[in-house]
Image (cartoon, rainbow, N blue to C red):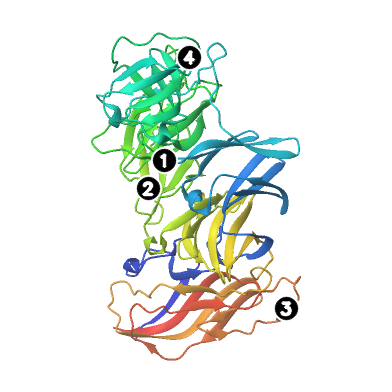
């Protein structure tokens, strides 16, 4: 019966899926719960949670950085935006969005202004004036001469073969009746703009499905007949509003809308409320439609080295520098697809764009190849797909190199990543309650947690070993099955398990609490550093059993550098 010593001093692959248990080249674990993989490859009990404040209902977190030393956290709740700074509530604004609307709410920030978009609502602008905040409707700039809005106009699919006749209306010289050749208008047409005879018409009255009343700026001439040369405003209550948003090369970019999901609208350079295409000069607005064999539904747009466009079926990019109306090189690079049912903001990690795939079963990293010409969408959770249980929120903490993915079941899947050191380790955070949202602000990770139907804004805090001041949490790291190279093990017996710890005050090995030499429970003490061991008796016949489990539930620090298994096996 050969002896063996199996030592693991690197846990860089984190928790891996069962289908990889037979691989002997992974530095992984069968289970990693409430522990982090450190830069050196060891394991550490996760930080605890401190309550920042109670909040009235479920909410979504959005970071808002006005300046380097002026950071705010937005808590978007039911028709309210709560503004926090340094853990204190500093403003409470009314908003048009209910809880169910928040899933599709997207946003982009430039200096002290943040713009929110939702396919069912007019965009809203959050601004900071002195010590006060204001949430106002986004307005397209108006031409001083004729008061026309600099909004894009286009033809939608259901307007093909529709003609319009302009006739006088008794309401006044600048009013007219717009008549279509078949049913077209709806009550939602009121408030929308129509471009006919090179004039903008604002619909103010719905008459019936073929007639509306509209007015224009100044006198006009009634048309001698029906015309097919007309267009509608791209955005309105009837046609919906932009679905996604970013800033790119000093242009405001809208990606997709409710009724035109494959369109991309870019504002005039430096004039983010002006979408007038004009005569096609280099700084004027741009409109693009994604064309492919598959119908493209734009999920989000990302400003990186290129303008990245993530759709429900693939990943596109516009690479022109500068981007002008006459030079638009757009290309689909990959065919993974993103989540369309809710907004899961892509994260910038080490120069890559990280997004959640359409099936919400993996996390992809969008990177350019060595030549800087083509994008690849690498799977970041290839070994840990079992953890991806319907993500509902995502955020990256650059200070701790951690990607947090809130799951529908109330857990958080956490990726500890450091490419330079070969660390790419997934694990799970659990708490007594459900995680609902996550955001990172100034190096601190904030979460919304539901505990007994009470919602808290909380933050992870170093040196804290419980959650919300009262809830203890257990941690667990379980080893992968033991392998013996080319031998087929019938059974093995473990004699001893040795663990090297650092600044540790409490630890259990295979369910047995270990007494640490010179145990000191004082909060400010460093704890024990060195080797500890337990003797184990009994044979193991289950080839996929975990040979060791490091765990604990006491509110004390634990750090594991390595684990060694001493025993013998029978072949």
Proximity of marks 3 and 4: CB atoms separated by less than 8 Å = no
Q: What is the distance, in whole Å, between disc 2 and disc 4 at their CAs?
A: 58 Å
Question: Toward which corner of the image does residue 310 lie, by quadrant?
Answer: top left
Front tag of 4 and 1: 4
Mark 2 and mark 3: Cα distance apart in space: 45 Å
Q: Nearer the viewer, residue 318 or 218?
A: 218
Q: Secondary structure at mark 3?
A: loop
The local secondary structure at tag 4 comes to loop
Instruction: Say which residue appears at 49% left-offset and 84% top-offset.
Output: 496
Q: Determine which of the numbered discs, if any, sits on residue 367 in the image.
A: 1
- Mark earlier in primary sequence (1, 3): 1
Q: Mark 2 vs mark 1: which is more N-terminal? A: 1
Is residue 221 visible in the rendered image? The answer is: yes
Quadrant that contains the N terminus: bottom left
In the drawing, does residue 430 fall left or right of residue 203? Answer: right
Residue that numbered label 4 is attached to: 174
Residue at image mark 3: 521
- The kind of secondary structure element at disc 2 is strand
The label on residue 378 is: 2
Q: CA distance from mark 3 to mark 4?
A: 83 Å
Total residue callouts: 4
């Amino acid at each position: 019966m050969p002896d063996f010593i199996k030592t693991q001093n690197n846990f860089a692959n984190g928790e891996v899926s069962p289908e990889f248990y037979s691989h002997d080249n992974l530095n992984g674990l069968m289970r990693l719960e409430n522990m982090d993989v450190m830069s050196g490859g060891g394991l550490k009990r996760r930080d605890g949670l401190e309550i920042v404040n109670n909040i009235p209902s479920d909410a979504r977190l959005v970071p808002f950085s006005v300046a380097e030393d002026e950071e705010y956290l937005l808590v978007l709740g039911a028709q309210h935006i709560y503004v926090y700074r340094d853990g204190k509530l500093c403003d409470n604004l009314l908003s048009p969005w209910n809880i169910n609307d928040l899933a599709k709410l997207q946003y982009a920030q430039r200096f002290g202004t943040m713009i929110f978009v939702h396919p069912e609502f007019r965009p809203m602008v959050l601004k900071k004036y002195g010590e006060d905040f204001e949430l106002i409707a986004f307005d397209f700039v108006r031409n001083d001469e004729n008061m026309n809005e600099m909004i894009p106009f286009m033809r939608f699919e259901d307007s093909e073969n529709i003609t319009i006749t302009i006739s006088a209306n008794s309401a006044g010289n600048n009013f007219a009746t717009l008549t279509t050749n078949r049913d077209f208008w709806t009550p939602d047409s009121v408030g929308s703009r129509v471009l006919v005879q090179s004039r903008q018409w604002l619909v103010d009255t719905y008459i019936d499905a073929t007639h509306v009343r509209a007015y224009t700026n100044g006198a006009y001439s009634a048309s001698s007949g029906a015309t097919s040369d007309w267009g509608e405003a791209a955005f309105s209550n009837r046609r919906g509003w932009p679905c996604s948003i970013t800033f790119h090369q000093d242009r405001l970019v809208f990606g997709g809308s409710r009724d035109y999901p494959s369109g991309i609208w870019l504002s005039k350079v430096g004039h983010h409320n002006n979408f007038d295409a004009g005569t096609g000069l280099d700084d004027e607005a741009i409109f693009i439609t994604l064309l492919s064999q598959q119908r493209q539904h734009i999920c989000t747009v990302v400003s990186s080295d290129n303008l990245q466009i993530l759709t429900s079926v693939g990943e596109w990019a516009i690479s022109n520098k500068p981007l002008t109306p006459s030079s638009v090189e757009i290309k689909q690079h990959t065919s993974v697809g993103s989540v369309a049912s809710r907004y899961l903001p892509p994260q910038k990690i080490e120069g890559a764009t990280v997004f959640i795939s359409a099936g919400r079963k993996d996390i992809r990293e969008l990177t350019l190849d060595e030549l800087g010409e083509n994008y690849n969408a690498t799977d970041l959770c290839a070994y840990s797909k079992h953890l991806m249980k319907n993500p509902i929120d995502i955020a990256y903490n650059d200070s701790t190199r951690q990607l947090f993915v809130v799951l529908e079941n109330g857990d958080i899947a956490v990726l500890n990543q450091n490419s330079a050191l070969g660390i790419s380790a997934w694990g799970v955070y659990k708490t007594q309650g459900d995680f609902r949202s996550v955001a990172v602000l100034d190096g601190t990770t904030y979460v919304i947690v539901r505990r007994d139907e009470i919602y808290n804004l909380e933050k992870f805090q170093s040196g804290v070993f419980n959650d919300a001041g009262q809830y203890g949490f257990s941690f667990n790291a379980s080893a992968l099955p033991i392998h013996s190279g080319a031998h087929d093990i019938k059974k093995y017996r473990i004699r001893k398990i040795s663990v090297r710890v650092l600044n540790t005050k409490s630890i259990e090995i295979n369910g047995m609490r270990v007494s640490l030499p010179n145990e000191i429970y004082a909060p400010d003490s460093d704890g024990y550093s060195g080797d500890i061991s337990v003797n184990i008796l009994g044979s193991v016949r289950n080839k996929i059993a975990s040979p060791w489990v490091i765990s604990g539930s006491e509110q004390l620090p634990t750090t594991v550098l390595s684990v060694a298994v001493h025993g013998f096996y029978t072949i």
